Image (cartoon, rainbow, N blue to C red):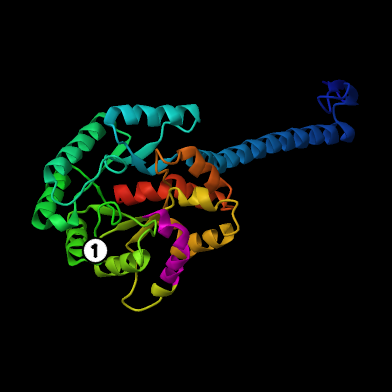
Amino acid sequence: MRAGSVQWVKADATEPMQQLPMRSPFRRSAMRSLHNRRAAATSVAGWRRTLTALALAVIAPIAAAQSALFDSHVHLWDGEKSLAAYEAQLKESKLGPARFAAMWFGGPNQALAGDMAKIRAGNDGILALAARHPRMTPVVTVHPYDGEAALMELERVAKQGAKVLKIHPHTQQFEADDPRVLALVTRAGELGVIVLIDNANILPGDSEKMFNLALRAPGTKIIFAHMGGMNFRFWNTLKAARTAEGLLGDNIYFDVSAIVALVADSPVEQEFVWTMRNVGIDHILLGSDYPQFTLTQNVDALNRLGLDEKEVAKVRYRNAHVLLNQGD
């Protein structure tokens, strides 16, 4: 067009058309303003998309961790029937499906010294049950006082994939400081089997004996169930022990099954949380002690302790995953 001609220019999407000369400085200013506004709008939209993506990247893993569960302490006294009841309970409480470690003994099923046939049958049953249910980790047992027969049974089940051995000083009627217990626990470590020992502190000197057992078998990862029960304060000694040269206790883990449900909202709750952090949040596992307690009771109690989201996620699932899979 010739000089002096006009052209309709829209300065903004929300403004009416303005009539400006083609070579007018006002037109050039309007065009620059339009360009800048469009660039700013594009930039803002881009930042919004970036911030949304970052927020999702942060929230998604936390949500996934909060939904993931590993119940490290389940008693299935009646095989498939008990498992069906356990899973129905999880479904009803909207916690399932969860991964879990389950044992056949306890309650009406005892694994006493001298009854190797019953122990072998029970171990075979729990291994077969786990083979049919991929979310389940089988927990086997032997009696330390059965000596060589116990070691042979441990080797047999380890070859079949058993990762966890449970022993119980109170119900199986043995002393934790007996040399035969040390021999069994040491052999378990050599086979890559984790040892789960009841530590409800029912017997006098229970925790003290188990602490020394763990120190004498440093090559074996040991989970102390119930974290000493109401004698949990003893385990604060680990914080000091880990500062001593050659006296580590890094092979010591705990499950907080049942005990967490007892101490939440109690006068000793803050002491319990203090103890959890002293022994190391990375060394603590969630458990239910089903059927005596439900997983819901334990999860709800854990959530009321005031731990941060990362700590809760570790206890709920992450620590068990790392311990049992020997990886990240």
For this view, does 216 lie left or right of residue 274?
A: left
Q: Nearer the viewer, residue 97 or 208?
A: 208
Q: Is residue 328 visible?
A: no
- At a point 31% along the width and 76% down the height, the residue shown is 246
Q: Secondary structure at mark 1?
A: loop
Q: Nearer the viewer, residue 115 or 198?
A: 115
- At a point 81% along the width and 24% down the height, the residue shown is 13
For this view, does 50 lie left or right of residue 90?
A: right
Is 265 colored magenta in this rendering? no
Q: Would you call the spot at circle 1 few (<14 residues within 10 Å), some (14-19), or many (20 or more)?
A: some
Is 233 colored magenta in this rendering? yes
Q: Nearer the viewer, residue 98 or 258?
A: 258
Q: Position of residue 319 (x, y in %)?
A: 40, 51
Quarter-wise, where is residue 216 in the image?
A: bottom left
Q: Position of residue 244 (x, y in %)?
A: 37, 78
For this view, does 317 lie left or right of residue 115?
A: right
- At a point 19% along the width and 53% down the height, the residue shown is 143
Q: Quadrant of the N terminus?
A: top right
Residue underneath mark 1: 219
At label 1, the amino acid type is Gly
- At a point 27% along the width and 63% down the height, the residue shown is 176
**Residue range (magenta):** 225-239
Q: Position of residue 327 (x, y in %)?
A: 32, 50
Q: Position of residue 306 (x, y in %)?
A: 59, 52
Q: Is residue 156 above or below residue 280?
A: above
Give the number of marks. 1
